[in-house]
Amino acid sequence: MVRSVAPLGRSFNGLWFATGSANLADGMALFALPLLALATGASPGGVAAVTMVLTLAWPLFGLQAGWIVDRADRRTLMAGVNLARAAVLAVVTIGLATGNLSLPLILGTAAVLGVSETLVDTALTSSVPLVVQPSDRTMANARIEATINVTNQLAGPPLAGALAGVALALATGASAALYALAVAGIAVLVVRRSPRPPSTELNRLAADLTAGLRFVWREPTIRALTLFTAAMNLVWGAALALLVVYAVAPGPLGLAPAQYGIMLTAMAAGGLAASVVVDSLRRRIGPARLLIADCVGTVLFVAPIALGLNVWAVAVGVVVAGAGASVWRILVATIRQNLTPTGLLGRVYSASRVVSWGALPVGAGTAGVIAELWTVRMAFAAATVLAVVMLAVFIPFAVRTDLSAALAPPAEQHTT
């Protein structure tokens, strides 16, 4: 218990604060964008397109983001990107206030936020090993994950839902202000410099951009976990793209926006609870069982809707899925950080996201097409089949792989 509240230093606290402020803004903005699309009269395919555009930046720009993060001053980069996010949401707020809101404006905003996420998320996760000791990485990642769950999902959706009940412009305006506030945390951040590649490699831009991708492919544990994450994200992309259509009236569940926000809050509550206990559970029952449990949670996320169950069954699946996803992100992030040289942290993170998060727009786009041609439930049925197949393939891998060794703190600290 004492370890769970141990101080990790001023720089980590600045990173932590910036994470909280920016992710509260994320939670509000990402909750509001699909509602804005619904308000313009968009079809299920149009609403799904918002999620597709939000996540399309990873496969298109992820490698470049990793290269930029490994070359740029992380403080300047994160501050600038957060200010850019604040600016684009201010434009949306003005569009709402003046009655000029349109689906193209929403999709353009989603594109900017998606590109911004590739840069900020890569800079954030690659900075953790540079501001804490190797033995503290799991703890630091758990705190970051808990904060993301509290702000992005636990507080963001209901707060945005409450503000949207008054005026959607309040939700987007508050999100813009929170992105700007994140710069205050970044201002106190001091990041130890990571080793640079030889100057000869700096002149080979194409090789430099793909260095992270090559490392991911050569490292068997990271490669496998990245591919499994991609398979799961096909399911999550489909579910997240259409959940709002199914849940919010006139969808079958008939929820009001505020009630839908509470459902997403329940997902975050599951993730928060998991992030608090993940380190002790890892030591007690092992990472393999925890990661298998997440795969089960992915099945439970989509199966209740595919089967046409009631709102309570859907809510239970959402909570379990949120808990499992939190565990997966914490453990996989720690494994990747432990197995990656410091000078490649940004590019390896972004490369893994290019593959794993590159599946999100594919899942969202495919689900949108299925929903347009058939029904929303048919899209969830297809996602359920894929989730079950993925679970069946992952179990043998988890059993035969020594994930505990990959999670052990590295013998040497790579930072300089």
Image (cartoon, rainbow, N blue to C red):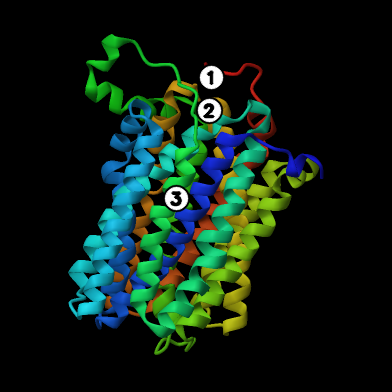
Asked which quadrant contains residue 233, the reply is bottom left
> 321 and 71: which one is in front?
71
Which amino acid type is marked by label 3? Ala
Which amino acid type is marked by label 1? Thr
Question: Foreground mark, 2 or 3?
Answer: 3
Q: Which residue is mark 2?
A: 130
> 365 and 25: which one is in front?
25
User: Considering only order in the chain, which callout, 2 or 1, is on the residue closer to the N terminus?
Assistant: 2
User: Considering only order in the chain, which callout, 1 or 3, is on the residue closer to the N terminus?
Assistant: 3
Secondary element at tag 1? loop
Q: Is residue 395 visible in this depiction of the protein?
A: no
Q: Is residue 184 left or right of residue 9?
A: left
Cα–Cα gap, marks 3 and 1: 26 Å
Which amino acid type is marked by label 2? Leu
Cα–Cα gap, marks 1 and 2: 6 Å
Q: Which residue is mark 3?
A: 182
